[in-house]
Amino acid sequence: MWNRVELIAREVFSTYGFGEIRPPIFEPTELFARAVGGDTDIVSKEMYSFEDRDETSVSLRPEATASVCRAYIEHNMNQLPAPVKLYSMGAMFRRERPQKGRYRQFYRINVEVLGGSDAPGIDAEVIEMVMTLFARVGLLSVQLEINSIGHSAAPVDGKLVCRRAYVEKLREALIEVKDKLGEDSRRRIETNPLRVLDSKLEHEQAIIATLPRIGDHLCDDCGKHYAEVKRQLELRGVSFRENWRLVRGLDYYMRTTFEITAQGLGSQNAVCGGGRYDGLVELLGGPPTKGIGFAIGEDRLILSLQEAGKGGAVQGRDVYIAWLGEKAQATAIAAARKLRDAGLRVELPAVEQKFGKALGQADRLGSRYALILGEDEVASGQWTLKTLADGSQAKYSEAELLEFLKSNKGP
Ligand code: HAM
């Protein structure tokens, strides 16, 4: 299943013009602190950080976007035709409380589009691509939620615009209800009020519903961008739900944010999260660069497919070669090589087995055919092929057998 998902992902991504990048497993801690944000849970509580021999701090990657942006800068990818479209796959590490769908080492399929414009058509195409992938792998009950969290430009004429102005309003509103909030949310009023909107605490939900909403505070440009993202999604036939509380847990996002949920995952039901991060490359010391991307939680994707009964594919064989006797072994070895060269999945037992035992083993391995090679078969050159599903048998010469099996390959 893992291979199938990754294979389909590579196919889908290449049809959209993406190439692969393989970022390192660890980076300077500073990179994640700057990119993801020192106050985020990921950086402040969940990173596996170590001191290197030169006493600098390095961390196992908790996510890939920071590394891809670092590589973009380091390798002058702004010189490449824009936008640069990259995907990567691999393990990430976060010291979270493990539970179903949440692990400390987990696998991700990560996509980034860097450089070029911030046209809403790019946001919509990236989302269309992940929805196409989910449809191709057969994910069920897929729900896309989107939001715009505005941008955080410097004040204009001394006035805060867009997200900063909204965050101030939100902070004021939160201070008024401070006593009713839990400890985490109270702390976030100062550190990161937006994150209060992410709260899953039951008793905070009614309070959060009364808070000011970002949609009412977007500046003209951000409002237009968001409206156009929605129109572009509609043009592509991608259905979505708006969720004004979707703020995401990483600091680099601006404007478009999105998350996708799927069936059978319980509380950890987000299989994909992403958004736009136009300021990030510049923040890391590169040129002003637009950026948008997402990451799929591959463990969760597989879990959801399994829950939907799409898992557990048995790794079958096309042919199990049941051989008996020294001469038959030599014939069996040569036959196995020819069948494998023809792309057939072949099991060749290393030690002699009685035919009854061999056939039982062939069955347990989910083989479609058993090729029976005893002394009679070797002497006559007529090999016996047994179809395990119905027990029927037929005799073939070597050449006929090869032809027959090639045209009757398994799925
Ligand atoms: P994120 O929302 O932190 O985003 O993670 C994306 C996805 O990774 C989640 O939706 C979830 O499926 C999976 N995931 C996260 N933590 C765990 C865990 N402990 N166990 C299993 N799965 C997990 C990011 O990290 C962004 N870098 C995504 C992005 C790329 N944004 C722009 N480009």
Image (cartoon, grey):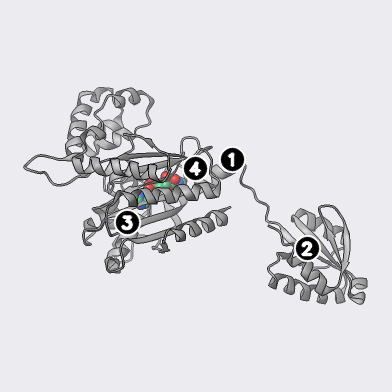
Residue beneath label 3, please?
A: 66
User: In the rendered structure, which disc, 2 or 3, sits on the residue that comes first in sequence?
Assistant: 3
The Cα–Cα distance between marks 2 and 1, rounded to whole angstroms, is 31 Å
Q: Nearer the viewer, residue 392 or 17?
A: 17
Residue beneath label 1, please?
A: 308
Residue beneath label 2, please?
A: 320
The Cα–Cα distance between marks 4 and 3, rounded to whole angstroms, is 23 Å
Q: Is mark 4 within 8 Å of ligand 1?
A: yes
**Number of labelled discs?**
4
**Residue at the location (36% across, 56% down)?**
112
Amino acid bearing label 3:
Ala
| Image position of 302 (left or right of 85) | right
**Residue at the location (31% across, 46% down)?**
250
Location of residue 390 in the rendering, given as x and y in whole percent from the top left corner = 84, 52
User: In the rendered structure, which disc, 1 or 4, sits on the residue that comes first in sequence?
Assistant: 4
Classify mark 4: residues with Cα within 10 Å, few (<14), some (14-19) or many (20+). many
Classify mark 1: residues with Cα within 10 Å, few (<14), some (14-19) or many (20+). some
Q: Nearer the viewer, residue 196 or 49?
A: 196
Query: Is residue 295 positioned above or below 215 on the image?
Result: below
Q: Nearer the observer, disc 1 or disc 3?
A: 1
Position of the C terminus by quadrant: bottom right
Q: Which mark is residue 101?
A: 4
The quadrant where residue 71 appears = bottom left
Q: Secondary structure at mark 1?
A: loop
Q: Nearer the observer, disc 2 or disc 4?
A: 2
Amino acid bearing label 2:
Tyr
Amino acid bearing label 4:
Gly
Location of residue 255 in the rendering, given as x and y in whole percent from the top left corner = 27, 44
